[in-house]
Amino acid sequence: MYTPIGDEHLDESTFQEGMARLIRMTHQNGHSGPSARESPEKVGDFHICKMCNHVWKIRKSNPNPKSCPSCHSTIWNSPNARKIRCARCGHEWVTNLKHPAVCPNCRSRTYDLPTLMVRCKICGRRWEDAMNQSDATCPNCGKIPRDSVKILPRIEDMVANDKVEPRKKPLSISREDVDSLSKQPDDYSRFVYLNKIGLGPTEADILIRYMNEQKPVDIALELDIPLGIVFETIAPYIDAAGTEVN
């Protein structure tokens, strides 16, 4: 029996991954017809688990097994089955969902974004940060605690041609919306919620800034929009919350 050189130094997962890759390459090189386009979980006479890369020969008695004999995953051959790594906390998990809502470990909704747009609560400076450490590095203040950083809606999430014009219909924000907004974990979540209840990207940005205690005049200056648009956007929120203009 042939034993690969240095095989004793390979762990099982590395060996199985190499076997899976070798079988796929061999099958592709030896076939040019339709059979070469088989699904990645079934190559030639072998099954390959998409979760752990375990390779086993197809049995006539059980050609379509319900689970992988190694990791026991029941989604070993699912089209959407894959491993995901959270960009915030590093947690890895297996999912069959096309786009999971949150990371099951840290509950972050931004688990699939390499970097986030953030703002320093101390000096107001904005920058992009991976936000995967216990602290952050502000370009102005240096290292600061993670809770001194605000996560902001990303520029890419905003429509480039979003016209800032007076609305034909007034915004509708209820007391329930105010309560729901107060329970959101970060600005990104608030941005998503406001989009769902009908606010445009710029309107959501205005309201989130106001909720972060930014003055209406400063909001208008930073976004380069008329002050009237700012007041028109925040007025329904103020009425629903029963507060006064900051």
Image (spheres, helix red, strand yellow):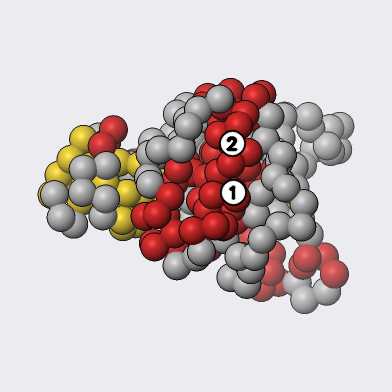
Q: Is residue 38 visible?
A: yes
Going 54% across and 49% down the picture, which residue do you hit? 231
Pointer 1 residue: 233
Between the residue at mark 2 and the residue at mark 1, the CA separation in whole angstroms equals 8 Å
Q: In the visual, does 65 lie left or right of 154? A: right
| Element class at badge 2 | helix
Q: Residue furthest bottom?
A: 32
In front of the other: 23 or 154: 154
Going 85% across and 69% down the picture, which residue do you hit? 34
The C terminus lies in quadrant: top left
Circle 2/circle 1 CB separation < 8 Å = yes
Which three-letter amino acid code belongs to the residue tagged 2? Tyr
Residue 36 in the image: state x and y as whole percent.
Answer: 77, 67
Going 72% across and 47% down the picture, which residue do you hit? 170
Q: In the visual, does 189 lie left or right of 128? A: right
Q: Residues within 10 Å of mark 1 (few under 14, many from 20)?
A: many
Going 50% across and 28% down the picture, which residue do you hit? 243
The dot on residue 237 is 2
In front of the other: 80 or 140: 140
Residue 212: image quadrant is: top left
In front of the other: 129 or 242: 242
| Element class at badge 1 | helix
Residue 201 in the image: state x and y as whole percent.
Answer: 60, 56
Q: In the visual, does 123 lie left or right of 29? A: left
